[in-house]
Image (spheres, grey):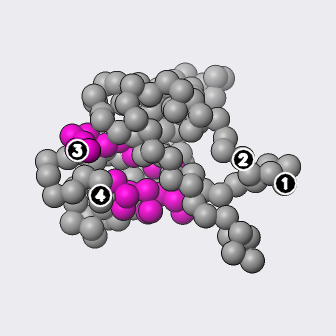
């Protein structure tokens, strides 16, 4: 299967590096474009275009790290920084806008109330994406014990 455009949401978690590496492997050496997207959620009490300096600075650092990760593997990463009310719909909108062929979502291993928790972004994207979605879940550190 060949992909022309792969979208990888990056959140600054440990899963980002492995997810970006997977995107590079799937891109091969063809003309596949890898798009890294970071979404800053904006509270409803603020205007959508509010300048949240600390969040923007942190998001720029996340995207810069993603670019370095992909560059080490010999690829180029196009990046976008978005502000939205909800992360899931923003990712799906970007997938539609950029006509992506694949979305790769990385999930850090998280628990809530002692149980594994996938959160709400990945399920929303899987349900509403206009293309296949590959979910990369970071391993459970306790599973090897």
From the viewer's side, name the closer residue of 101 and 15: 101
Which class describes the residues within 10 Å of circle 3: few (<14), some (14-19), or many (20+)? few
Instruction: Give the residue at mark 2.
Output: 117
Residue found 70% across the figure and 54% down from its top? 110
Compare marks 4 and 3 and give the one earlier in the sequence. 3
Distance between the alpha carbons at the discs numbered 1 and 3: 39 Å
Distance between the alpha carbons at the discs numbered 4 and 1: 34 Å
Q: Which x, y percent locates residue 65?
A: 39, 61
60 up-or-down from 74: above or below = above
Compare marks 1 and 3 and give the one earlier in the sequence. 3
Distance between the alpha carbons at the discs numbered 2 and 3: 31 Å
Tell me: 54 left or right of 62.
right
Residue found 31% across the figure and 43% down from its top? 6
77 up-or-down from 124: above or below = below
Is residue 51 at least partly visible in the picture?
Answer: no
Mark 2 or mark 3: which is in front? 3
Tell me: 67 left or right of 52.
left
Q: Which x, y percent locates residue 88?
A: 53, 31
Compare marks 2 and 4 and give the one earlier in the sequence. 4
120 up-or-down from 32: above or below = above
Start-end of magenta stretch: 1-23
Q: Which x, y percent locates residue 45?
A: 66, 23
Compare marks 2 and 3 and give the one earlier in the sequence. 3
Instruction: Give the residue at mark 3.
Output: 2
- What secondary structure is found at the residue carrying circle 3? loop
Instruction: Give the residue at mark 4.
Output: 24
Which class describes the residues within 10 Å of circle 2: few (<14), some (14-19), or many (20+)? few
- Most distant residue in the front direction: 1
Instruction: Give the residue at mark 1.
Output: 114
Quarter of the image with the N terminus in it: top left
- What secondary structure is found at the residue carrying circle 2? loop
Which class describes the residues within 10 Å of circle 4: few (<14), some (14-19), or many (20+)? many
């Amino acid at each position: 299967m060949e992909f022309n455009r792969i979208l990888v949401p990056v959140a600054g978690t440990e899963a980002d590096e492995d997810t970006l590496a997977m995107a590079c492997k799937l891109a091969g050496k063809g003309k596949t474009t890898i798009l890294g997207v970071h979404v800053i959620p904006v509270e409803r009490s603020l205007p959508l275009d509010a300048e949240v300096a600390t969040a923007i600075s942190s998001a720029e650092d996340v995207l810069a790290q993603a670019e370095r990760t992909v560059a080490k593997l010999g690829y180029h990463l196009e990046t976008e920084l978005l502000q939205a009310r909800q992360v899931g719909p923003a990712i799906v909108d970007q997938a539609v806008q950029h006509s992506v062929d694949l979305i790769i979502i990385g999930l850090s291993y998280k628990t809530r109330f002692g149980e594994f928790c996938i959160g709400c972004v990945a399920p929303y994207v899987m349900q509403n994406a206009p293309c296949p979605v590959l979910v990369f879940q970071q391993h459970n550190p306790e599973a090897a014990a």
